Image (cartoon, grey):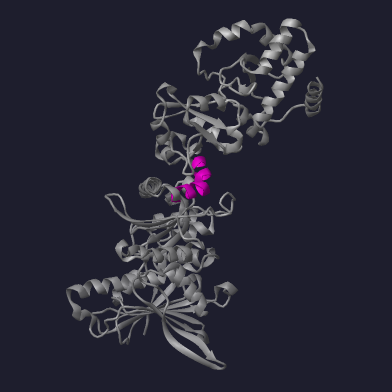
Amino acid sequence: MPEVKEFQAETKQLLNLIINSIYTHKDIFLRELISNASDALDKIRFLSLKDPSVLQNDTELQIRIEIDRGNNTLIVEDNGIGMSYEEVIENLGTIAKSGTKNFLNQLKQAQSENTVINLIGQFGVGFYSAFMVAKKVIVETKKWDQDKGVRWESDGTGTYSVEECEKANRGTKITLILKDDLDEDENYLDQYKIQELVKKHSNYIKYPIKMKWEEEVEAGKKKITDKILNSMVPLWNKNKEEISQNEYNEFYKEHFYDWNDPFDVIHFKAEGTTVEFTALLYISSKLPFTFFSKDYKRGLNLYSKNVFIMENCEEVLPDYLGFVKGLVDSPDFSLNISREILQKNKQLKVIRKNIERKILDALKSKLENEREKYVEFWKEFGKVIKAGLYQNIQEKEKVQDLLLFESSTSDKNMVTLKEYISKMKEDQGNYIYYAVGESKDIIENLPQMESFKEKGYEVLYLTDEIDEFLIKLMHDYEGKEFKSISSSNVKIDEKFKEKEEENKDLLQKIKEYLKDKVKDVRLTDKLKESPACIVSANEAISLNMEKTLKNLEQLPFEAEKILELNPDHQVFKILTDIYHKDPNSEEIKDYAELLYNQSLLLEGLEIEDKATFAKLITKLMIK
């Protein structure tokens, strides 16, 4: 006669919570049962290393899944260590692991079904998840050194029965009599559904997970084979020397849904005092088209001892490296670790730091050793890396050497900041010069570029909207300050003051005519062929930044402008002649308006009054 026992009080509370509170994520029950079976196989394998005879004639360690549609049952069976009568009562009648009360308190306080699901498994209670899908669970088990087996049975409501039984082989067989009200997508008697769950959660369990597989070979005839559902040996657990590039690439395409080969593969194992883990990381070669949308999933997949536990864990990867895909496997993760726990997990911080360093080292290696390939990567992901640096400017030393820029002297492979300062002219001072524009062609035609080209100073070309904002935040690189060629205080020749003094009355007159448009009018030695240019009076807000912020409707004011004139240009000589003949000539006002608007155009800025500008051109053409 079976012995009927009541569940331990805490176990009863747990079962009540599982049966009545959880309506989603039921699929994890299979993962839990398979993980328990794998643990049982580990234990018998460990014993057999000391004494091979414990396996007797049953030497092929495996897990079997059986579908019985006629009886609405699903069976998970292993030939592991098995349990004695006392162990069945201890393991299945009570929550054996310490911390039970704490666990139940967390369950009661859980705000969502997901949180409840995530807590299961942390305290060794994974077996009870079977009651999410089963109205009755039967366990038949035999310990390796026992003559008799043990049968345990329960509907999960309050009691269970236990009795000795005949069982030929060691191990544990769990029979789930499934609930009648499972949803359509919870069809656990469908072989494809079971295969899908094994592939997702238990693909890398190191023992074969087998199932009788039905295939229709011709009309009315079926072929039944013994199919292994899992691949067993995870790619990331193999030695790197044994893995071909093609194997890495195929794994990436299959698991991360990309049809392109990755830009780079990073595969390493870390063993420290705090945490042990293996990481397999892929740097994508193409930016996903959804990358900047809210639907894009960042993060790495987490495994614990080859068992999948979480998808897209953001805590192990900095945001700016969100284009990296891959996984982390650590024996220190518990199954169903919740996101709340992850956020406070010190081990995660160690892993994140290691992973970030490995990715940055890999990118630097590509930059140094495969420049053309890195340039192609930069064209895809440069904006992402720059945005990440902008958001974490206090850590600029980590990323600044990865930046690439077109410049006035660079070839198709662009230039790094380190390369720029290695080529600086002796008389260049302590400045890294840059120019801002929508394209390389626009920048090269800026009037301000003329003098820098003549002097042979290299100028970085900033063509992304974020570039100037980033450069302003960075402020300097290795002690060399970034300076815009359009900056109001860039001076190449300090002997220039005399010319300004000679023409101060004319400059003041032009300033009066442009009083609502510019803060000042002055002469410049930056121009060689152009008659004038516009610069910003405020070092903090440039003309380009004003334009960008206006487009984003985030700038309530305009940048103050300075009109700079080239005293050696024919136009300025005409202006001085007109002024000497008649200081109040209307022509001076016309020239002032024309030079101002022409300078706006060359900076890529909007002309405020296009009709008046056109009339002035016509008027001067007639003259």
x then y, percent, for residue 297: 53, 54
Frontmost residue, 544 versus 101? 544
Q: Is residue 330 above or below residue 485?
A: below
Q: Image quadrant for the N terminus?
A: bottom left
Can residue 183 be spotted in the picture? no
Point 25% across, 79% down: residue: 144
Write the start and end of the magenta stretch as one range: 373-387
Can residue 422 be spotted in the picture? yes
x then y, percent, for residue 535: 61, 22
Q: Quadrant of residue 522?
A: top right
Frontmost residue, 561 versus 232? 561
x then y, percent, for residue 452: 52, 26
Point 43% across, 41% down: residue: 402
Along the horizontal axis of the image, is 368 left or right of 298?
left
Q: Image quadrant for the C terminus?
A: top right
Assign the magenta stretch its main secondary structure.
Answer: helix
Residue 374 falls inside the magenta stretch = yes
The residue at the far left in this view is 50
Q: How many circles with numbers are drawn on the protein? A: 0
Q: Is residue 47 above or below residue 304?
A: below
x then y, percent, for residue 19: 51, 68
Residue 203 falls inside the magenta stretch = no
Q: Is residue 449 above or below residue 419?
A: above
Q: Is residue 426 above or below residue 341?
A: above
